[in-house]
Image (spheres, grey):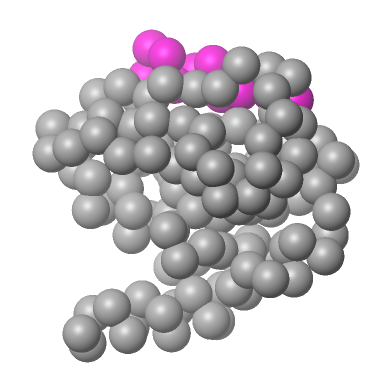
Amino acid sequence: MNPEHLKYTKEHEWIGEMDGVHAVGITTHAQEQLGDITFVELPVVDTEVKAGTPVVTIESVKAASDVYAPAAGTVCAVNDDLEGQPELVNQSPYEDGWLFKLEGVDASELDKLMDAAAYKAYLKELDDA
């Protein structure tokens, strides 16, 4: 189940406010598609990103995949725990497996993303296709 308070992209990223900044990660669906995650290449703190640009590379036993910024902002933190424990993304994609945090996110950009109900409907469309 996807947390209700987050916003979602069609590329299966999530974003949500956490202590005045916005945490970003991948959804349960995304980590299931990737399989066992073996490596996460995180961005450099203070990097400015634009919505839709690749920010993180995740490697798994199946493939390598880019994670895109769901909104523009400046990377203000990365999840250093993933360097030694990339499997946290599989085990806890919405809590311990967050990837990076953004500051300076424009709230109007978040309005363009899907809420939990819309994302659930989107997943159903993909399953039915």
Magenta-span inclusion, residue 67: no
**Quadrant of the image occupied by residue 93:** top left
Across and down, in percent, residue 12 comes to 43, 58
**Residue under the image location 23 percent in, 80 percent down:** 127
Identify which residue is drawn at 46% across, 31% down: 56
Residue 105 vertical position relative to residue 75 in the rendered view, above or below: below
Numbered marks: total: 0
In screen coordinates, is 116 left or right of 18?
A: left
Q: Is 77 included in the stretch rendered in magenta?
A: yes
Q: Is residue 108 above or below residue 57?
A: below
Residue at screen point 38% across, 12% down: 84
In the rendered view, tell whether residue 12 sits above or below residue 69: below
Task: Give the magenta part as a residue range.
Answer: 76-85
Question: Residue 36: horizontal and vertical position, in percent?
Answer: 20, 36
Image location (x, y in percent) of residue 34: 23, 45
Quarter of the picture holding the N terminus: bottom left
Taking the view exactly as shown, the residue that stands out farthest to the top is: 84
Quarter of the rendering occupied by the C terminus: bottom left
